[in-house]
Image (tube, rainbow, N blue to C red):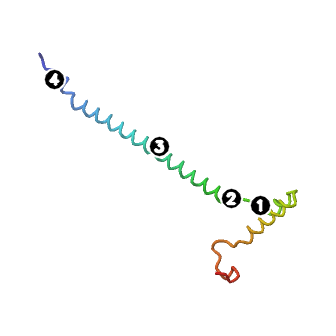
Amino acid sequence: MSFDFRKEADFQSRFDQEAEELAKQKERESRQTALIFALLIGVLAGTGIVLLAVSNRQSGPSDLHDCATIESGPARLACFDELSRQQATPFKGAPPEELGGQK
């Protein structure tokens, strides 16, 4: 049995090459994980923005034209009543003196 020095002399370069390949693979996996995380954060942020935009919509009539187009008498009157209730409520940050002295 003979010992091949040429094969064993290349040990250090083979070890370095395998270590470099392992480091590249770990970096590639880290980048993939970061990309997936960034996409997930983007999707969640987009969903939150859409939900906020949808939640600010008014339910019911928004102006007189909406009520004026209704043909039925009682439904038309109910529409105008709802519109007047929406416009009569003060905004949330109104100071008490602007509410007619009510606290």
Give me the residue at 67% from left, 83% from top. 97
Q: Which of marks 1 and 4 is in front?
A: 1
Distance between mark 1 and mark 3 Cα atoms: 43 Å
Is there a contact, CB below 8 Å, between mark 2 and mark 4?
no
**Amino acid tagged 4:** Phe
**Amino acid tagged 1:** Pro
Is there a contact, CB below 8 Å, between mark 3 and mark 2?
no
Give me the residue at 16% from left, 20% from top. 4
Q: Nearer the viewer, mark 3 or mark 4?
A: 3
Can you give x and y, in whole percent of width and height, for residue 65 in the image?
83, 61
Q: Is mark 4 on a helix, strand or loop?
A: helix
> Which residue ends up furthest to the front in the rendered image?
74
Residue labelled with disc 3: 36
Give me the residue at 37% from left, 40% from top. 27
Q: Nearer the viewer, mark 3 or mark 2?
A: 2
Residue labelled with disc 1: 61
Q: Is 53 placed above or below 7 here?
A: below
Q: Nearer the viewer, mark 2 or mark 4?
A: 2
Q: What element carries label 3?
A: helix
**Amino acid tagged 2:** Arg
Q: Which of marks 2 and 4 is nearer the N terminus?
A: 4
Q: Earlier in the sequence, mark 3 or mark 4?
A: 4
**Which corner quadrant of the image does residue 55 belong to?**
bottom right
Can you give x and y, in whole percent of width and height, for residue 68 in the image?
86, 60
Which one is in front, 41 or 24? 41
Residue labelled with disc 4: 5
Q: What element carries label 1?
A: loop
Residue labelled with disc 2: 57
